[in-house]
Structures are given as structure tokens and as C-alpha cells.
């Protein structure tokens, strides 16, 4: 049975993954904000290392109230607007809908479930280097792996079908046996590099080239790993060195929070920092250095 | 018996305190670097909240090799050049000379004593808001208290006479019973505010106005207090709140490290951060957040 997809937030992520699904023949409905008029007229352009493509006519909407109900709702917005999410997605929900939060951080599913009890939720983690470079214009630079995991999805077969659809669309998609594990694992990278590139106004390559920040990155990673362990998530300490080695090999990179900082947009401090700190604290572990980075980021956010 | 003073480094501190001693009738010999020619011709100008004064002719030198030996050598240089200190002050020493390190940080006396075994050393802490605003031109804005403490001075009466000379020169000077206590106490303020104004590119008033950095300042202070405690220095936890309250009342202030940062001069990371961290670590206490601040500062120092 074909799945009807809704993409809420058609930017770097939603435009790429949703566009790939359309190209593979899936039915996808896209929410746009400022780009709506442009896309209605010109369609969606995806430049990708895996091959450029153009979708001249897509199901584009300016508000979710005009969209049909969907089986799967891919939420691809910044978490800084998540308090508005229930109102935004309500018009898309039917009794079996699955909401997939393709967002970074921790505690997202819990918050949404508390606001919309009874709905089915999954989480998604995108390992991708992709930007929106103009109206309805996405530039996919590298990677693209997608990991999905159930928060409270009733039947696993439903998530398996979504993963299958992505795979058919030439996306490296996987089902995570444990969403919490996957979210914490991604935080091991996101916590040091999002915050430090902002606080020190730099890029990953410079952080890796300097022994002080290379060591500090490792210490922050270990703190996150120990925080996860205390929450029952069995991340290994060796993951820190693996991620350091991987980051050393990466091209110079500005994580999404650094781009938000550069453009003076709200930063995703709440779900990438505050929630993990709070979750580990409630489990009895204080992530001291992560908490210091959080406070520095909140100062920066409040003083530009 | 009159003391012959030598001032090594005639800047914001040396110019003010040395100038006050001259004005009170003491014999003082001053080392200048770039300002030497100017001062030879124009003298030393001190603008002070306690009253401006001009010293048209002072004993100015361009190198310590031309200076006479002195009874008391006031070292008023940045600690970033302390590795050159033994060579610099050797020509000023006689068998009874006392070297007073009027510098911030920890471990200064130990390092100098290791390089020049047998000399008598004291430490000095200046609680002053003072800047060099031009060649041979000091601007004293506020405060001025001076605390002296013995590292290995043979007879306490000698330090008492120095304190007396400063008092006669209208300086609020005191003898600290425990130099280590006095140095750690000053670090409780210096460690949070020097580093955070640099890393967050701001001033003390903004750090105090934001609840995140106000709390982080308190946490850093408590870490320093606990580090000191572990080293046998009985600082009280209540000192943190006292210093927060004092800083809230202060005018907007950029500590010396922030000025060094703004002018891209070497920062005093070694003695204000690394030595205290190392000293506490050897005593079995890890100052996690202070160590994080140190690494951020070293990155900044190495990447501008």
C-alpha cells in the first residue's frame, strides 16, 4: 500500500529527502513558507553530488490547513519552533498517521507526545551535508544517510516500509533498533562541534588542528558518552576517538548552529544542550563542560 | 634606612606605584622600553582620581644593565615575559635585594626562585584600575590597594618597611600573612572574568546582566575556591557571592586579559590558568570548567 507523505518544512533536509521521494514516484505534499510563490511557479531544484534534478510541479502548500491528511509526516523544521508544532501538524493527522521528527537533539518525541497524546511518533537522524541556497533551491554537498527509529509506533512494519521507500529513492536509510541510542550517538558529535564553532567563531578543521580544542572536543564527547551511559544507553568510550578521527578527515565544516549564529537566527540550544543536560542530571550525572558550553551559547544568543 | 627602589616595567602599574613613591620622596629607578626617549625628554605624567601629578625628571633607563643595584625591585611586567626575568633583573641584585612580583597568577615566585636560587622574593597584588594611555602617561581610574606577601623574605621587618613606604605615598598597602592565600583569593575573581570577557568578547557588566553567565561565573569561582581548599588554602565558599555582588556594582569593565585580546597581545594564560589548574590537580582536585576556559583561551591565542 502506498504511503502518502507530508513534508513540514521544505528546506535543506525536507527539500532533499522529499524531492528524492517524489522522484522515486511517491506521493509527497510539501509545506513552504517564504518560498511558496516561487516554487508554485518554478518548481523545486535539487543540486546533488549524486546527480542534479528538477521537479517542475510539486504539491506545494503555504499552510498545513490546505494540505490533505498524510500517512507519514516528515518534520524537517528547526527545533526552535517546536512549541508551535502541535497546531501546525494537526490538520495533517488521521488516526494512523506517523509523525517523524527529522531533527537533532533529545526529548523531542516526549515533548510532542505530551502535547498530542495518542499520536504515533518516530525520530529521524539525517547524516547529511546539505544547504538551501535560494528559493526552492537545495544544494546537497555530501553524505545523506538517514536513520529512523520508533518512539511509540504501533507496528514496526510501518517504519520498515518508510525505510524501504527511502531506499527505493536511493537514500541510504536504516532502522535503528533503539531511537534513544541513535539520538545520544549523534549528540556525541553535535554537542562539541555545534557549540564550539559558535563560541570560538571557527570551523571544525581549526578545532581539530589545535591540540587544546582537539582535547576539549574529546573531553566533551566523553562527558556525553558518560551521560548517555548513566541514562542506560550503552555508548562506548571508543566512539570519541572514532569521531575525532572522522572529523580530522572531514572538509572544513560549519555545523548548522554555526550557520544559525552567522545569520543571527535562533540556535537549537534547548534540544541539543539543555534537554540532554537535564536528562543526564535526572539520571544522576552532571555534564559539567557541556553545561558550561550551554551557558556560553545562551549568553551569545541573548547578547547579539 | 631609606630603601632604593627599582621599577622593572613602567606601565599602568609600575608608572602609578613608582610615581607615587617618587612623589613621596623615595629614590626610584625606572626601566622603560619604547617610552624611554619620550620620558627622558618629557618626564612621567600620572592622571589619577586621587589627583594628577607630573614628574618632570625621573631616573629613567632603557636597560637594567645601566641601572644601579636596588634594595627592592618591583616587577610590573606582564607574566608572558617571565622566562626572561632572571636575565633582566640580575644587574639589579645585591646580596640583600628583595624582588617583589607585582603580577597576577600562581607559581610566579616558585618559578623565579628555581631560576635564581638564593634570592629573596615577595609577591604583590594590585587591586587597581589603571591604564597606560600614551608614552609616559598613566591614567589611574579607580581603587589602588596593594597587598604584599612574603615568599621567602628573611626578615619580615623589611616587607613592613616597604608597606610603610607605600602608605607614606598615600597607597592603601597591606601585608598579607599568607601570600598563597592572597594569590588564590585574587584568582577567584581573575579566573572567571579575564577568560569569559575574552571568550565571549564582552565586559563584566554584560556577564553579570545575563543569568547564564552570572551563574557560570559563580560556578567557576566555586571551582577555584575548592581548588584552593584542596591545596590547603582556606578560602570560604561565601567569597563567590561577595565577588558576584561586588562585580554587579562595578562600572562596565574589561579586565587586562580582555585588553590584551583586543590589542592582540599575548595573554597571561600560563600563570592565571595553567599553573592554578596544575597546582590543584597535583593536590588531587580537577578544576573542570577552569580547564575548559583555559583550552578555549589557548585556542583563541593560537588562532588570531
Image: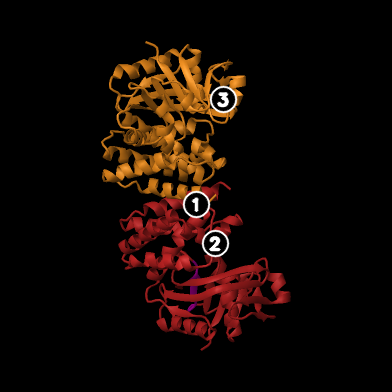
Chain colours: A red, B orange
* Residue B211 seen: no
Q: Is residue A246 visible?
A: yes
- In the displayed structure, would residue A235 be above or below residue B17? below
Q: Chain of mark 3?
A: B
Q: Which residue is mark 2?
A: A254
Q: Which residue is mark 3?
A: B139
Q: Are marks 3 and 2 in contact (CB under 8 Å)?
A: no
Separation of disc 3 and disc 2 at Cα? 43 Å
Tell me the crowding category of disc 2: few under 14, some 14 to 19, or many 20 or more residues within 10 angstroms, Cα based.
Answer: many
- Looking at the image, which residue is at 43% across and 12% down? B168
Examine the rendered structure and indicate whether residue B243 appears above or below residue A268.
above
In the image, taking residue B219 as reference, residue A103 lies left or right, namely right
Pointers 3 and 2 within a single chain: no
* Residue in front for this viewpoint, A85 or A101: A101
Provide the residue span drawn in magenta: A95-103
The residue lying at 46 percent from left, 29 percent from top is: B76
Question: Which element is circle 3 on?
Answer: strand
Amino acid at each position: 500500500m502506498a504511503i502518502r507523505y507530508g513534508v513540514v518544512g521544505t528546506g535543506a533536509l525536507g527539500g532533499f529527502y522529499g524531492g528524492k521521494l517524489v522522484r522515486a514516484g511517491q506521493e509527497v505534499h510539501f509545506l513552504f513558507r517564504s518560498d511558496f510563490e516561487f516554487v508554485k511557479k518554478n518548481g523545486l531544484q535539487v543540486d546533488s553530488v549524486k546527480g542534479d534534478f528538477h521537479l517542475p510541479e510539486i504539491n506545494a502548500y503555504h499552510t498545513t490547513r490546505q494540505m490533505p491528511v498524510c500517512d507519514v509526516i516528515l518534520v524537517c523544521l528547526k527545533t526552535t519552533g517546536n512549541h508551535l508544532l502541535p497546531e501546525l501538524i494537526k490538520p495533517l493527522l488521521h488516526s494512523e498517521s506517523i509523525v517523524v521528527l527529522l531533527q537533532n537533539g533529545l526529548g523531542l518525541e516526549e515533548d510532542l507526545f505530551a502535547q498530542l497524546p495518542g499520536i504515533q511518533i518516530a525520530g529521524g537522524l539525517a547524516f547529511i551535508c546539505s544547504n538551501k541556497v535560494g528559493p526552492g533551491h537545495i544544494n546537497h554537498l555530501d553524505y545523506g544517510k538517514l536513520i529512523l527509529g520508533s518512539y511509540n509506533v504501533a507496528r514496526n512494519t510501518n517504519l520498515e516500509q518508510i525505510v524501504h521507500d527511502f531506499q527505493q529513492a536511493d537514500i541510504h536509510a536504516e532502522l535503528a533498533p533503539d531511537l534513544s541510542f541513535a539520538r545520544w550517538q549523534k549528540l556525541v558529535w553535535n554537542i562539541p562541534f555545534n557549540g564550539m564553532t559558535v563560541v570560538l567563531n571557527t570551523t571544525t578543521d581549526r578545532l581539530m588542528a589545535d591540540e587544546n580544542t582537539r582535547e576539549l572536543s574529546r573531553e566533551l564527547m566523553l562527558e556525553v558518552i558518560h551521560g548517555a551511559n548513566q541514562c542506560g544507553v550503552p555508548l562506548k568510550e571508543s566512539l570519541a576517538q572514532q569521531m575525532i578521527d572522522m572529523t580530522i578527515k572531514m572538509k572544513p565544516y560549519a555545523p548548522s548552529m554555526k550557520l544559525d549564529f552567522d545569520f543571527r537566527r535562533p540556535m537549537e540550544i534547548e534540544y541539543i544542550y539543555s534537554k540532554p543536560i537535564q536528562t543526564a542530571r535526572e539520571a544522576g550525572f552532571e555534564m559539567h563542560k557541556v553545561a558550561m558550553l550551554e551557558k556560553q551559547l545562551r549568553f551569545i544568543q541573548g547578547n547579539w
